[in-house]
Image (tube, rainbow, N blue to C red):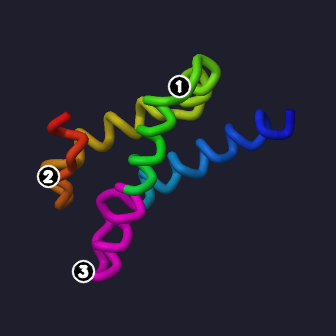
Amino acid sequence: MLFQFQIPKLLQSLIALATFRLGTHLREQTDLLRLQVRRQSRLCLYSIQRYGDEQMQSELVNNGYGRVMSLSLCTAEGAGEEHDKEIWD
């Protein structure tokens, strides 16, 4: 039962990290770190989507995973993420 309560919080955190400061560019090093955090967060979410059961799929939808994927594709061209593997899969 405890596991079920932790999953939505995990998904919320990963989704927040996957979209963290999109479009904000300060310094190259900071931008690269943010890009890496977003990519790794999306990779975790993708793994949950791919290997999760029906309940996990529902949790992803309820926590905004569709928005993450949409933003990933929409920002890929202009935010330095054009080499993301997700776009080609």
Which of discs 3 and 2 lies nearer the camera? The answer is 2
The residue to which callout 3 is attached is 28
Residue type at numbered disc 1 = Val
Horizontal and vertical percent position of residue 16: 52, 51
Horizontal and vertical percent position of residue 5: 79, 38
Closer to us: 12 or 52: 52
What kind of element bears circle 2?
loop
Q: Which residue sits at x=59%, y=17%?
A: 54
Q: CA distance from mark 3 to mark 1?
A: 33 Å
Q: Residue furthest front?
A: 51
| The residue stretch that appears in magenta | 21-39
Which quarter of the picture shows residue 1?
top right
Q: Is residue 41 above or below residue 50?
A: below
Q: Which mark is residue 78?
A: none
The residue to which callout 2 is attached is 82
Neighbor class of circle 1 (other Cα within 10 Å; few <14, some 14-19, many 20+) is few
The residue to which callout 1 is attached is 61
Horizontal and vertical percent position of residue 48: 51, 36
Q: Earlier in the sequence, mark 3 or mark 2?
A: 3
Q: CA distance from mark 3 to mark 2?
A: 16 Å
Which quarter of the picture shows residue 31?
bottom left
Residue type at numbered disc 3 = Glu
Neighbor class of circle 2 (other Cα within 10 Å; few <14, some 14-19, many 20+) is some
Q: Which residue sits at x=17%, y=61%?
A: 80
> Would you say residue 4 sits in the magenta stretch?
no
Residue type at numbered disc 2 = Glu
Neighbor class of circle 3 (other Cα within 10 Å; few <14, some 14-19, many 20+) is few
Location of the C terminus by quadrant is top left
Q: Is residue 5 left or right of residue 74?
A: right
Q: Is residue 62 above or below residue 27?
A: above
Q: Earlier in the sequence, mark 1 or mark 2?
A: 1
